[in-house]
Amino acid sequence: MKKSRNRSSALPAPSVAKTSLTAKAHSLTVPSVGRVAVAIMAAGKGTRLKSQLPKVLHEVGGKSLLAHVVAAATQVVAERDVYAIVGYEAERVRTELANSGIQFVLQAEQRGTGHALMAARQALAGYDHVIVLSGDAPLITAETIGRLLQFHLAEKAAMTLLSTDLEDPTGYGRVIRKSARSAEVKAIVEEKSATAAEKKVREMNAGFYTFSVPALYGNIGKLSTSNPHSEYYLTDMAEVLRRAKQRVVVYKTDDANEVLGGNTRAELAAIDENLRLAKCRQLMAEGVTIFYPATCVIDCEVEVGADTVLEPFVQILGKTRIGSGCRVRSYSVIKNSEVADEVTIRPGCVLEGARVGVGAVLGPYSHLRPGSEIGEGAHVGNFVETKKIKLGKGSKANHLTYLGDAEIGRNVNIGAGTITCNYDGVNKHMTVIEDGVFIGSDSTLVAPVRVGKGAYVGAASCVTDDVPEDSLVIGRARQIVKQGWAREKRAARPTTK
Ligand code: UD1
Ligand code: CA
């Protein structure tokens, strides 16, 4: 379904032929769409998670539950037609989603899913239809939302709900149809209120709905709180509307995964696993080799080029992009970084906010912190930490080194144990190392300092002043040799047996 910014026709006229509506829907002419909003119920605390963090901000696949739902919703309607109904820790939720372009509605007190929609009455007044999503069910896709809407329109319903059959629907609301063959719904019965016979129904209410806005708000006042939770249940609208002689229908999907909710930590883990494996499958289909996919943690938005090999136990997080023909060896964690083609990342590397050029070699055990830019073919090796640096093409820092706030040219050799002393206790200062410089092992470069093109720094130097091009600098105490000193010492103090 296409995204449109035009509020008066938020959706293109649905093409029934393209979708898999039921045979019955095919024979109906589809009315014009009208103005469509999406309301996402996201005000609950999530008591079952036993968490300070609001439920919808818990993460799966590297993104909050709510961010997943918003991503699906904004593929169906324009951002400004998406309303998140927030309540518990509302400010925190708003802040997290601040850049999404969606709108927020406050449900100050959380008195149930029906009450959430009561809170959105004013915001939704100008729309013809509202698609209601659950902020805690992140696997819903734009395709399914689109089909739910189309079915609703084709059926000219006041309320359409999404359902699926579950092996074990315990805990969910059950869909009670007028008859087995009919799409029309008599009621949705919550687990706690269900009779023994109703509990046997395997068709569960997924928690996604489309309502005609006038029908919803013309009748929502009839909801009551006479139920075991003393809440206003949105699910009761099915019976309320049916009694008001309005059409209530159900659209069943056979993808049971899409409706999974993250009510408990165990459910969150199941959803997370589901997303991670789906991500691995997607990357493998795109030509990435992944050994032992079940051990790899790859966030939803990560991109990896073809012929890259990911070894077991790697984590690739956030907005990371990895080119093609790379090899990422075990136990590396890469976050919000850009890695070009043909890069080798040996075991145990940690990258965050780094950029790595073509053919570079990292690790084992390199730590690239934010602002690290590693040039083409450069090497960063064992126990080397970098932060806010540019390391030029072909340069090497292979062992036990800290490079921070530095601009390092091409073909520079940084000896083992080199340290840029970038911090004077108050401010950070720059170290500049020009092309072709050789820094001997165990040198300290006290910033601000510049080492000119082609210069040599003798091992163990402490460089405090700029070094001219092509010169040799030695900044260490001269070696003293005391001939025979050790022998004399041993003779003076004979060893005891
Ligand atoms: C709900 C349905 C149930 C369905 C299940 C599917 C009701 C009464 N029951 O149960 O039939 O099978 O979803 O997952 O609707 N929320 C608010 N404000 C509130 C209360 C909840 O915004 O006052 C939000 C929650 O943050 C959550 C969503 O609504 O994102 C659903 O609420 P939740 O308490 O998880 O409902 P379920 O018990 O899962
Ligand atoms: Ca839920």
Image (cartoon, rainbow, N blue to C red):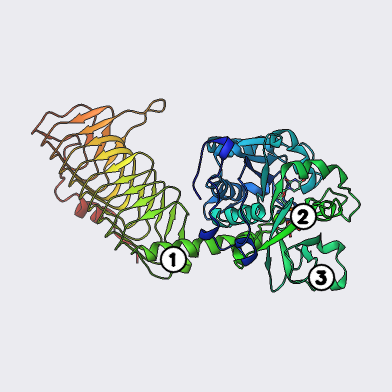
Task: Determine which of the numbered discs, if any, sits on residue 199 in the image.
Answer: 3
For residue 476, side relative to residue 339 (left or right): left
x and y percentages locating residue 235 in the rendered image: 78, 54
Position above or below: 74 against 307: above
Q: Are marks 1 and 2 in contact (CB under 8 Å)?
A: no
Mark 2 and ligand 1: say if the CB distance to the nearest ligand atom is below 8 Å.
Answer: no
Label 3 SS = helix
The kind of residue on which mark 2 rests is Arg
Q: Which residue is mark 1?
A: 281
Decide: few, some or many residues near mark 1? Use Cα within 10 Å; few <14, some 14-19, many ≥20. some
Point 17% across, 47% down: residue: 394
- SS of the residue under disc 2: loop
Tell me if residue 303 comes above or below residue 195 in the rendering: above
Give the Cα separation between the discs numbered 1 and 2.
41 Å
Structural distance between the alpha carbons of marks 2 and 3: 24 Å
Residue situated in front as seen by the camera: 141 or 261: 141
Mark closest to the chain's N terminus, 2 or 3: 3
- The amino acid pointed to by label 1 is Arg
Judging by the rendered image, the residue that carries numbered circle 2 is 247
Lateral position of residue 90 relative to residue 426, left or right: right
